[in-house]
Image (spheres, rainbow, N blue to C red):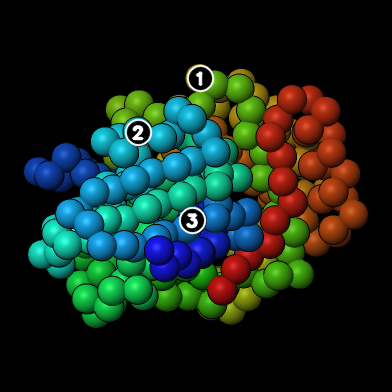
Amino acid sequence: METQKIFCPAKLNFFLEVGDLRPDNYHNIDSVMQTVDLCDIVEVGISDGNGRINLNCNLPELCDPDTNIAAKAAKKYLEEAGKNDVDVFVGIEKHIPVAAGLAGGSTDAAGVLLLMNRMLGMFDEARLLRIGAALGADLPFCMMRGAARATGIGDKLERLRPLSREIAIVIAVGGERVSTAEAYRTVTPGTGSADRMASLFESGDIYGICSEMYNAFEKTIPGMRPYVPLAKHVMMEYGAIAAMMSGSGPSVFGLFGDHDLAERACDDLARRGYESFVSFSTM
């Protein structure tokens, strides 16, 4: 069986406004997002067969191909390609915390689509992005990677200059996780715009970026998950330029100009029971 592997990076939201609910039950968003080098590893193998999807993951609770979005992505690709003469093996080595607002499931599914298209070569980039969007709002960005402004449901993307790798990013996740559906039920639609944040990414102004960081979910989720404000407090105590929740939470990330302080903050958070990581932006 031919197999290939791909690193699938986590996603952070530096700006996230949630707009009105659409007829398709998605919300419009306006967001600036950046991938980081906290990654899962996805492996795909293709062999002669009859369209069967075989899934293996180091987390047993994610091994059901009927519910795992990466396995669904493999099935969707075969359906769109009209191929029923191959079997697909999907292997996932998870490192990104699950249900943490880091797009861990979406990035795995994006990796599957990228690998399958690399191996089978059925679609151009635009078609592949549309296939991803049909599976989940974060998939198009997870396939593009780097930095981008996302509008619509997250499927309309404008590539931006990535965050400088001189900035260390501490990511911490603690306690009970938050389902995306639960988070969206709590949020109040707003009308904020990511125009300025997009401009700041393009200019590389890290202090401007930190001053404009915004997440609509921070209006509700921290009150439901007290370890969110605690993680932010610890990061700021260690000298973070800014700290904020990512996506629908409960992950928190802080930006550090001093890498030693970032490591110390990460260690302290780990002692307090958080899953914590020091990460850097990816292209």
Query: Residue 92, how many percent across, how many down?
Result: 49, 48
Residue at left offset 45%, top offset 28%:
61
User: In the picture shown, does residue 207 fall above or below 186?
Assistant: below
What is the quadrant of residue 250 in the picture? Answer: top right
Q: Nearer the viewer, residue 112 or 129?
A: 112
Compute the Cα span from label 1 to label 3.
33 Å
Q: Nearer the viewer, residue 165 or 52?
A: 52
Q: Is residue 233 visible?
A: yes
Query: In screen coordinates, is 251 left or right of 184?
Result: right
Label 3 Cα crowd, 10 Å radius (few <14 / some 14-19 / many 20+): many
User: In the picture shown, does residue 199 fall above or below 253?
Assistant: below
* Between marks 1 and 3 in the image, the one whose residue lies nearer the viewer: 3
Q: Nearer the viewer, residue 164 or 282?
A: 282
What element does badge 1 sit on?
helix
Quickly name the residue at label 2.
64
Look at label 1 and name its amino acid: Met
Look at label 3 and name its amino acid: Val
Compute the Cα span from label 2 to label 3.
16 Å
- What is the number of the mark on residue 69? none
- Tell me which numbered mark, 2 or 3, is placed earlier along the sequence: 3
Q: Quadrant of the C terminus?
A: bottom right
Residue at left offset 31%, top offset 39%:
65
Q: Quadrant of the N terminus?
A: bottom left
Q: Is residue 183 visible?
A: no
Quickly name the residue at label 3.
42
Quickly name the residue at label 1.
224
Q: Nearer the viewer, residue 114 or 238?
A: 114
Query: Residue 6, how many percent across, how many down?
Result: 51, 64
